[in-house]
Amino acid sequence: MRLDLSDQILLVTGASRGIGRATAEALAEAGGTVAVHYGHSDDAAAEVVEACGPDARSFQADLSTVDAVDGLVDQVVDTYGRLDALVLNAGVAMATPLDADTDDWHAAWSDTMHVNLRAPELLSRHALRHFQSRQPTGGRIISIASRAAFRGDTPDYMTYAASKAGLVALTRSLARGFGEDDVKAFTVAPGFTRTDMAQDFIEEYGEAHATRDLALNRLTEPDDVASLVVFLASGQADHATGTTIDVNAGSYVH
Ligand SMILES: NC(=O)c1ccc[n+]([C@@H]2O[C@H](COP(=O)([O-])OP(=O)(O)OC[C@H]3O[C@@H](n4cnc5c(N)ncnc54)[C@H](OP(=O)(O)O)[C@@H]3O)[C@@H](O)[C@H]2O)c1
């Protein structure tokens, strides 16, 4: 089986670093044309565009603001004429301890919910309208959630777990609600994956916290997640729409 994305335009959010970067590059390697979204890492995004080939373009948008999110899908469609798949990868994990200052508590919950849930909801809305406008061909939405959506997280990261649980429910609803428009939606739920985000956890809780539950003997790498996204984007798994696939090295099986 060869996974060929040469007829697809795919938008990956948070493609400047980590899982998003590996995913953008893997999609391009499979022939896809990748719209590389980033927030603040301009230089890193430029490197990813370079790696993704001549048709790749970068798109900047701060996903913590409604206005920036609202224009992103339209910019991609204006550039390429269409969009075939949306990979909702960008995310933040902010420590929000119970004894945080009340203003800081509100700000962290609000920012996390905006980047991890509201931005995916708004981007999905725009993508759905585009997919509906070009029937009979719909499109695919692939959400990068987290193991934390299912097993919860440490007390400091309740907001992160809650935002990811919302993303899972959103993605399942997209699959169930828009299948008749030929929209397929999948969730990928990584465990600890070797990126800047995981490094922040490791610095806070120690390396053992990241590795102690693993069934496999090595930490998940961004490429382990990226290859799965390529498979889901290829159409080979369309009848698994609505599903969640765990990528957590056997650390949490539910
Ligand atoms: N790493 C893990 O252990 C792990 C585990 C489970 C789930 N995940 C999920 O996997 C996804 C990718 O995580 P990662 O580990 O690759 O994270 P990462 O290395 O910290 O990268 C985060 C990406 O999201 C973008 N981003 C963050 N805030 C943004 C904002 N306000 N506006 C626009 N873009 C923003 C960043 O773009 P800029 O740098 O350009 O701003 C960056 O490209 C996230 O949804 C995360 O929750 C990760």
Image (cartoon, rainbow, N blue to C red):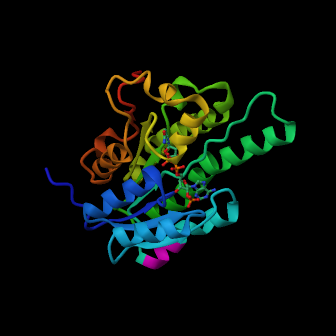
Q: Position of residue 17 (x, y in %)?
A: 48, 56
- Residue 66 part of the magenta segment: no
Q: Is residue 227 visible?
A: yes
Residue visible at 32% across and 27% down in the picture: 217
Residue visible at 81% across and 33% down in the picture: 100
Farthest residue to the right: give it: 102
Nearer to me, 138 or 237: 237
Could you tell me what secondary structure mostly forms the magenta stretch? helix
Nearer to me, 47 or 9: 47
Side of 18 where 247 appears, left or right: left
Residue visible at 46% across and 71% down in the picture: 46
Q: Quadrant of the C terminus?
A: top left
Q: Position of residue 75 (x, y in %)?
A: 53, 73
Side of 70 where 243 appears, left or right: left
Q: Is residue 139 visible?
A: no
Which portion, as a residue range, is magenta? 75-79
Q: Position of residue 151 (x, y in %)?
A: 52, 23
Side of 127 where 24 appears, left or right: left
135 w.r.t. 90: above or below:
below
Residue visible at 59% across and 62% down in the picture: 39
Nearer to me, 153 or 70: 153
Name which quarter of the figure residue 95 lies in: top right
